[in-house]
Image (spheres, rainbow, N blue to C red):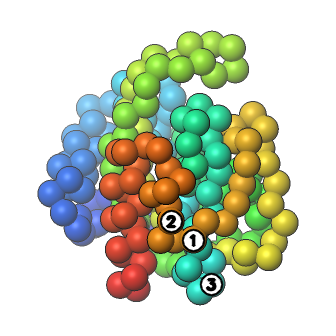
Amino acid sequence: MEWIDAVKEYNPCNEQEMKDREIILKYSRIFDDILTRDNEIIHMTSSAFVINKSRSKVLMVYHNIYNSWAWTGGHADGEKDLLFVAIKEAGEETGVKKLIPVNNEIASIDILPVFGHIKKGKFVSPHLHASLAYIIEADETEELIVKPDENSAVKWIPIDEINIFSNELHMKKVYDKIVSKIKNL
């Protein structure tokens, strides 16, 4: 399914998702480059909330830019299949090879702020990530590999301890929302 159709069909779970969905749809009509980083104001990203088979742990990376434990994910960079992007990024950032979507549905829609930072020696101005997230399952016995240009550690964290590890207040709300959805699967 085309990403824009998935967003249109997504049933928001709260007012935040309803408003963020509305904004993403609005700006997808205004900007023809929302799938690329050429759009320096807002662009699409996709993340994987990777859980183990028993759904008791989440695979997270220590993100170099955000200096926090975080989910995996990345920019669409023109790709229209955002589930594919989430899976690809999770594999690249963790080394895990077998990543299976729990379902093909969007698990969370969020507009996330990105503060100005240096990446690959260049300043990246503050902007917004129009984020779609998916719940992905992986085998926690697979070897984990750090991707040094993006993260400095990879590990399985007990699902009930995410907020102890994450120091990004705005992300704790997103993680709590997804954990709540996982418990209702």
State the CA–CA distance, disc 2 to disc 1: 5 Å
Q: Residue at x 69, y 14 (%)?
A: 121
Contact, mark 1 vs mark 3 (Cβ under 8 Å): no
Q: Residue at x 43, y 25 (%)?
A: 115
Quarter of the image holding residue 68?
top right
Query: Residue at (26%, 32%) from the top-left corner?
Result: 30
> Where residue 73 sits: x, y (%)?
57, 50
Distance from Cα at disc 1 to Cα at disc 3: 13 Å
Image coords of residue 94 (percent x, y) = 73, 56
Q: Quadrant of the C terminus?
A: bottom left
Dot in front, 3 or 2? 2
Kindly identify which numbered label has been placed on residue 158.
1
Q: Amino acid at mark 1?
A: Pro
Q: What label sits on residue 53 in the rendered view?
A: 3
Quadrant occupied by the N terminus: bottom left
In terms of depth relative to the viewer, which is nearer, 135 or 70?
70
SS at circle 2: helix
Q: Tag 2 or tag 3, which sits nearer the N-term?
A: 3
Q: Are marks 2 and 1 in contact (CB under 8 Å)?
A: yes
Seen from the viewer's position, the closer of residues 28 and 146 is 146
Of badges 1 and 3, the one in the foreground is: 1
The image's mark for residue 161 is 2
Q: How far across and down, in percent of the image, does residue 173 sit?
A: 33, 55
Q: Amino acid at mark 2?
A: Glu
Q: Is residue 126 left or right of residue 151?
A: left
